[in-house]
Image: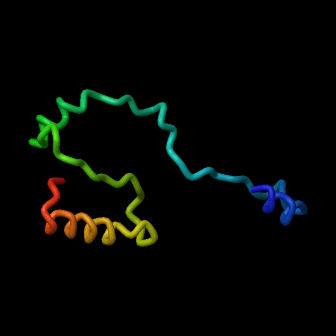
Amino acid sequence: MRWHSCAFSRVRARYRVIRNGTALGRFQPGDGQEVRAALGIARDDFVIGMFASFKPVKNHALLLQAVAKLIESGHRL
């Protein structure tokens, strides 16, 4: 950020930084057990998820391959 500000000081008024992230305050944690029951997930099952946009750079396929390997090796996910 500081580097960009110095490197582009002449055009500073023509650009702005759009931070990549999520305001976590918008999300309220619910009752995990209620959600697990609704989805048929046991209390001791391990849950893996991914919070990302559907873009190739996020490599969702790699996550799916890794999860498949874990399941094949006997892990309860």
Left or right relative to 15: residue 19: left
Residue at image coords 21%, 69%: 69
Residue 60 picture quarter: bottom left
Measured from the top left, where is residue 23 in percent x and y?
51, 38
| Colouring of the image | rainbow
Residue at image position (16%, 63%) is 71
Name the side, left or right, on which 48 lies relative to 72. Answer: right
Position of residue 1 measured from the top left corner of the image (x, y, whole percent):
75, 56
Figure label count = 0
Q: Identify whether 46 is placed above or below 1.
A: above
In the current view of this chain or complex, which residue is farthest to the right? 10
Residue located at (15% from left, 37% from top): 43
Q: Name the side, left or right, on which 57 lies relative to 19.
A: left
Query: Residue at position x 38%, y 52% from top?
Result: 51
In the rendering, at what x and y percent does residue 58 appear? 43, 66
- From the viewer's side, name the closer residue of 44 and 41: 44
Q: Please provide percent x and percent y for residue 41.
A: 13, 43
